[in-house]
Image: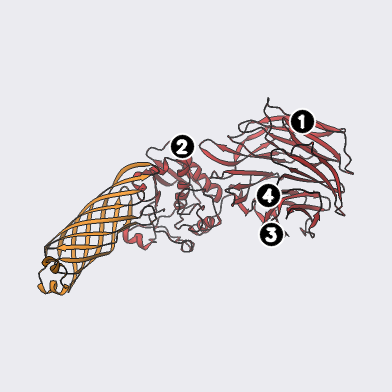
Amino acid sequence: MRALALLLALPGLAHAADVEPAWAAAALAGADVPIPSNRVTTRGALALTLERDLWRRLGLRLALHASRAEIATDLGVTAGATLRLLGWRGLRLRATAEAGYAAIRVDKHDVVLWTGALVLAPGIELGWALSRLLELRAVPLAFSLFWNELWIPAWTPRLGLALRW
Amino acid sequence: MRGTRPDIDVAAALRPASAHPGRCAHIVMLLLLAGCDARLDVSQPISLDPEGAWTDVQRTSLENAAESWNVELGTHLGVQGAADQRVPLRLSEFVCAFTNGVTSQTGGGVEVQLCSVDASFPWLLFPLALHELGHVLNIRGHIHDDPDAVMSPQSGGDRRFTAADRELFRRANPGFEPDDPCDVVFPVALSDARPVPVRTAHGSLLLWAEADGVQIGAIDMATARVKRAARIATASYPEWVRATLAPEGLWVSWVEGGAMRLAHVSLPGLRASAPLDLDIGTHDFQKVIEVSTAAGDTDLFVAISEGLSNPVLYLYRLDRTSGAQRPLLKTEYLRSSGYFVRLGGALVLAVRNPYGVTLHRWSAADGAPLASKQVVHLSQGDRQIDNFRARVIGDALLLALFFGSTRPVELARVVLDGPGFAVTKTTGISPPGEGNTLLSIDGNDDELVLALSSMREYHPADEVYVMRLDPASLEWRGDWRRLSAPDQVPSVQPWVLAGPTRHVVVWRELHDLMTIEVKTRCF
């Protein structure tokens, strides 16, 4: 009950503490929408991230991604940096930049194959401290740029929760 | 989904495209890829260069897609041709995860990547390559309201060049014109009835059925362009449109609401008389398989064949002045379909028999039958004929007999001889491909032209081929020439019209039961 009370505590309490936790782990859900999009390649997506604030506004992030469309399943890992652009009361605005690799399983016309791509993922995310430990996180403007002899961009909006400690 | 650009609607796509090579045109791509718009000059040759392991079948599909654009719009796409403008094409597994094909118009050039899985199926590769080549030819947008259009973002299907495709191309390449009007096909109309080409002393005409009338178009034999010139209004859709030349003008007949109607069209004014209902007996026009008309000196002769599996031929005469019906013959014993033609002073009825054509003859003056039945027997062993065409060219009746796929087409030249006929020449012509279905023949004193529909290996669609022949010897002049685009048309029916210098082939493409398109091309 004590822990629950801490989790649900008012954002103002977190702000009042004025001590930014160094670590965070987040679980986010959303979509990978290739540009241009269509029904069979738009993916439902999940992401798990582990973050560590290093110095002032700069942090490091490691992320695991999984997404699935009608004809493809992606499993990816990325690492990158976060930069806090704005911190005002419980609101945080961050710019993120990640790079990594995605393994992609294609199942099309009864043909199954594996392929892969390098991934660059720039984005802007918003965090709203629900409590000292819990943050609501929204990523409205983020893209993954897949490279395998050509670039294919995808819009990757996410929404989830982060646990900070 | 095509291209590395987002889909945009056709209205946006129809806005004039940039005429400045290298101009950065798309804000999203500018942000994401720092890409610049690479445009090709479609009036100059463009070489498509397959990279990696392409099979012969895949190369053939690519060649067909390139030729379809060339034939439909007059471009100069070629596979590994001699050209300064070169477009690499690669097969990619990665692309399969996101789309079927991507055409990148960024950086210094244009390149295409096609999903290797789609490319392994010829029936998927052809429409995919056809679509991506549209982007190679500077088209940036898509057509969202017609899934059959070449530039529809939907995959597969029976693709065809629609008016919206042509407009997209025209807007993307303003000012472009084909080198020669005969390089490209001309889309005349959507009509699910047979078009009727007619040569008159005042020019060539093309008649076709539309929802509420018979449309009469004037054919420019130098370009194959057809201009709408007159119209016979009907209360409902006219079927079995036929036309017959007579000294006083053109007689147009059609079936409407279960009855046969007739109108006279003056020449060269193309003024149509009020339609005349003809009482030519009780027919179930649902069962009609052929209608043929010919003009005698005073009468119009009508042949109606009924019944698919067991045809019966009915013959009628009508006084062209009064419209009075004069039954000629009701021939249950003529269990076949046939054509009426005027040959000199005679009316000739050509009727199919199992192994050839039977000719009957009447006097054109009074319709009196002459004892002149003759069988033109052009046997190919025990092979029965599938269908035939009869056409009067000069003083001779040319018969083209079709014995089925891969079999030679037999030609016979028949003239009047005393009270009967004489066959003066026969020849056999090997077809260009497989699965030949329908043929047509026409000519003048200098040249005969033969058109037929055929299929090629690896390409299960009908295409129009033409052949020139010497009218006296029936010898070939050159080889078969393909005139229609090698797209995905399941059935094609051609008619050929010979002109003094250039000829025109008219065909209808049966894409499906709802979409039948009439096209022309000169040669």
Residue B376: numbered disc: 1
Residue B195: numbered disc: 4
Q: Amino acid at mark 3?
A: Asp
Q: Chain of mark 2?
A: B
In the image: residue B324, left or right of residue A127: right
Q: Are marks 3 and 1 on the same chain?
A: yes
- The residue depicted at 16 percent of the width and 62 percent of the height is A163
Label 4 crowd bin: few (<14), some (14–19), many (20+), radius 10 Å: many
Q: Chain of mark 3?
A: B
Q: Earlier in the sequence, mark 4 or mark 1?
A: 4
Q: Where does label 2 land, which residue?
A: B57
Image position, residue A22 (x, y; %): 11, 63
Q: Alpha carbon of mark 1 to alpha carbon of mark 2: how far? A: 43 Å
Residue B212: numbered disc: 3
The colour one sees for chain B in the rendered image is red
Callouts 4 and 2 close, C-beta under 8 Å: no
Q: Are marks 1 and 2 on the same chain?
A: yes
Residue B83: numbered disc: none
Label 2 crowd bin: few (<14), some (14–19), many (20+), radius 10 Å: some
Question: Mark 4 falls on what kind of element?
Answer: loop
Question: Which residue of the protein is positioned furthest toward the front in this rendering?
Answer: A1
Callouts 3 and 1 close, C-beta under 8 Å: no
Q: Earlier in the sequence, mark 4 or mark 3?
A: 4
Foreground residue, B304 or B446?
Answer: B304
Residue B470 seen: no
Q: Earlier in the sequence, mark 3 or mark 2?
A: 2
Question: Mark 3 falls on what kind of element?
Answer: loop
Q: Alpha carbon of mark 4 to alpha carbon of mark 2: how far? A: 35 Å
Q: Earlier in the sequence, mark 3 or mark 1?
A: 3
From the rendered image, report the letter of the chain displayed in orange: A
